[in-house]
Amino acid sequence: MLAVASNDAKTAIELIRQQQSVGLSAAELAAADSVVDLDADEAQCPACGDSFTPGVRNCPGCGLRVSPD
């Protein structure tokens, strides 16, 4: 958790985002902002990029837990 004065919040968020993106490729930045649509016919793992059928608990490619159940 980070505590900052409310008038500094916008600047703090911008600085955190800049630091998080240092050294990341465009593909890695896109993956970090990806959302898994568990209602789609097929989804893509945000960690490894493998495709999977929603309803599975873990990504078959890397094991990332992708189901809230």
Image (tube, rainbow, N blue to C red):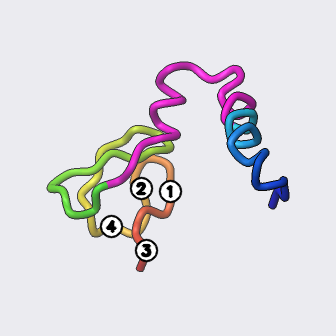
Measure the C-alpha gap from mark 1 to mark 2: 5 Å
Whichever of labels 4 and 3 marks the residue nearer the N terminus, that label is: 4
The disc at residue 68 is: 3
Residue highlighted by disc 1? 63
Q: Quadrant of the C terminus?
A: bottom left
Is the residue marked by circle 3 packed among few (<14), some (14-19), or many (20+) residues within 10 Å? few
Residue highlighted by disc 2? 59
Q: Nearer the viewer, mark 2 or mark 3?
A: 3
Q: Bounds of the magenta span?
A: 17-36
Q: Secondary structure at mark 2?
A: loop
Identified at 78% across, 45% down, the residue is 8
Q: Residue 1: which quarter of the image?
A: bottom right
Please state the horizontal and vertical placement of residue 45, each as a whole percent of the image.
Answer: 40, 47
The rendered magenta stretch, by its main secondary structure, is classed as helix
Measure the C-alpha gap from mark 3 to mark 1: 14 Å
* Amino acid at circle 2: Cys
Measure the C-alpha gap from mark 2 to mark 3: 13 Å
Above or below, 32 against 27 in this view is below
Image marks 2 and 4: residues in contact by CB distance under 8 Å: yes
Is the residue marked by circle 4 packed among few (<14), some (14-19), or many (20+) residues within 10 Å? few
Residue highlighted by disc 4? 56
Please state the horizontal and vertical placement of residue 23, each as a whole percent of the image.
Answer: 69, 20
